[in-house]
Each structure stands twice: as structure tokens, then as C-alpha cells.
Amino acid sequence: MLRLFAGVAIPDDLRSRLAVLQGGIDGARWVASENMHITLRFIGEVDEITAEEIDGALSRLTASPLNIALSGAGRFNSWNKPRAVWVGVEKTPDLMALQEKVDRAIINIGLPPEGRKYMPHVTLARLKTRAPNIPRTGSRPMARFARRHLSHGKSSCMRAGWVGQGPTTVPLLSIH
């Protein structure tokens, strides 16, 4: 089984800027900068045949270059416990159009729709235990991440997996 998601890779210079924000949260598992991305659709665990169908469906998609604005930061909670720390991505028309195309393509091959409302972001850390020092959305230093625009013309279907001590992402295909 493969754990898949479709995402937009972000440029190296932006990854470096985001990596500087990582630190100061007890118990955080920081995302390696080379694995930072904007998820368009979490697909989940699929077999090899379904992965090939997804590959075919997504490889036929086209998209305009994206003008992405990163703005703000926050955390995702599960049962009122923080689970992830993220930097927000504004819902631009081009990003939302690409996300909808990806979602439609995946639904058209027979997979169920995503159960959660789409909220574009870049995950900086995952948390296993309740860390007492996690800032709330908009608090300092989390709110210091200013708005940043970037143009990007490539999206990828990525496979999530584990290598050594942490998660890794491997591009499977590109959407141009």
C-alpha cells in the first residue's frame, strides 16, 4: 500500500525561510525542509493499481502558474489537543482551481471526496504529545511570518512514507 497526496512543491528559498521558524516547541517533530509542500488533496492509502489510476488521472491535468501568498500561522487541533503547526496559504483563484481539478480527478476514478474542508497550508511540525508552549494562531512569534508571494508552475502527486527516523515525500508525477 502507498500513502499518497497531491501537493505543490515550494521553492528552496522559501523552504529555507520557513525552516528558520522551526524550533521552540517542546515535543515537536519538525518537517524536513525538503519535504515542505502545499497539499492539494490527501488521498490516503491505496494499492499499486489505484496509484497507477491516480497517476494517469493527474498527469492529464493542466494548471496555470500559481501565485501563492503565505500569510499567518496557526495550529490544527484534534480533540482539543494541538497536532500540527502550520503557515497559512491564501486561497487564490488559481490555487483553488487547481485543488478542485485534482479533487475532481480523484473522485472520478472512484475514490471518496475529502471529508474535511480544504485549508491550504505548509506544515512545519507534527506533535504527538500536548506541548505547553504552542502559540495560538496570531500570537507572537507565529504571527511574524509576513505575506510572501511566489509564482510556481509545477504541482506533484506525492507519496508519503518513512525513511530512517522520519517522514519523507517522494514526487510521483508532475502537473504542468
Image (spheres, rainbow, N blue to C red):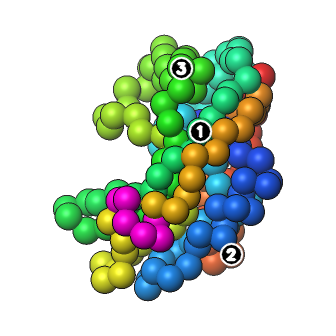
Residue 171 lies left or right of residue 45; in this view the side is right
Residue positioned 40% across, 34% down in the render: 118
Number of numbered labels in the structure image: 3
Q: Is residue 69 above or below residue 11?
A: above
Q: Amino acid at mark 2?
A: Gly
Among numbered discs 3 and 2, the one appearing first in the sequence: 3
- Measure the C-alpha gap from mark 1 to mark 2: 33 Å
The residue at which mark 1 appears reads as 69
Q: Quadrant of residue 50?
A: top right
Q: Main secondary structure of the magenta part?
A: loop
The residue at which mark 2 appears reads as 164
Q: Secondary structure at mark 3?
A: helix
Residue positioned 37% across, 27% down in the render: 112
Whether pointer 3 and pointer 1 mark residues with C-beta atoms closer than 8 Å, the reply is: no
Q: Amino acid at mark 3?
A: Pro
Q: Quadrant of the C terminus?
A: top right
Residue positioned 55% across, 58% down in the render: 145
Task: Say which of marks 1 and 2 sits in front.
Answer: 1
- Measure the C-alpha gap from mark 3 to mark 2: 38 Å
The location of residue 76, given as percent across then percent down, is: 35, 57
Other-residue count near label 3 (Cα within 10 Å), few / some / many at <14 / 14–19 / ≥20 = few
Other-residue count near label 1 (Cα within 10 Å), few / some / many at <14 / 14–19 / ≥20 = some
Q: Secondary structure at mark 2?
A: loop
Residue 138 visible from this viewpoint: yes
Residue positioned 20% across, 64% down in the render: 80
Q: Residue 93 has which mark?
A: 3
Given residues 89 and 174, the one toward you in this image is 89
Residue 102 visible from this viewpoint: no
The location of residue 173, given as percent across then percent down, is: 75, 33
Q: Is residue 152 above or below residue 97?
A: below
Q: Is residue 163 above or below residue 138?
A: below
